[in-house]
Image (cartoon, rainbow, N blue to C red):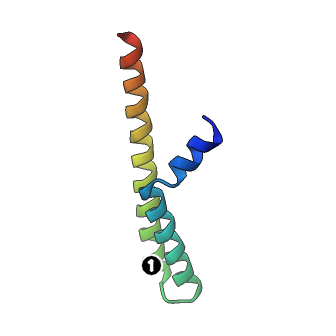
Amino acid sequence: MNIKDRIVKLIDLKSIITLIMVTTLSVGWFINKVTSDQFVPLVTMIITFYFARSNTDSINTNDSDIDNNSS
């Protein structure tokens, strides 16, 4: 995978939304607008959802590659 492909994947909408939400919550935590009780579960949910979707997308891509090669 070359650098251009990695940049395109990084600019994916879900990546942008994930980065914005985590950054916003982090800033809110540092300026004491978001408590630790709110921060930890929310960021954990966001990160888990992002990596679960990312992992599912890569599995689906690998499955389609296998299907194309077997034909």
Q: Residue at x 44, y 42 (%)?
A: 55
Q: Quadrant for residue 65, please give it.
A: top left
Q: Is residue 69 above or below residue 3?
A: above
Q: Is residue 31 left or right of residue 35?
A: right
What x and y, as percent, mark residue 63? 38, 26
Position of the N terminus by quadrant: top right
Q: Residue at x 40, y 55 (%)?
A: 49
What x and y, as percent, mark residue 25? 49, 76
Is label 1 in a helix, a strand or a loop? helix
Q: Is residue 19 left or right of residue 64?
A: right
Of the pair 64 and 46, the residue shown nearer to us: 64
What x and y, as percent, mark residue 41? 42, 69
Kind of residue indicated by mark 1: Asp
Residue ID for mark 1:
37
Q: Residue at x 51, y 47 (%)?
A: 9
Most extreme residue toward the right is 3
Q: Is residue 41 above or below residue 34?
A: above
Q: Residue at x 48, y 57 (%)?
A: 15
Position of the C terminus by quadrant: top left
Q: Quadrant for residue 32, please give it.
A: bottom right
Q: Is residue 32 left or right of residue 63?
A: right
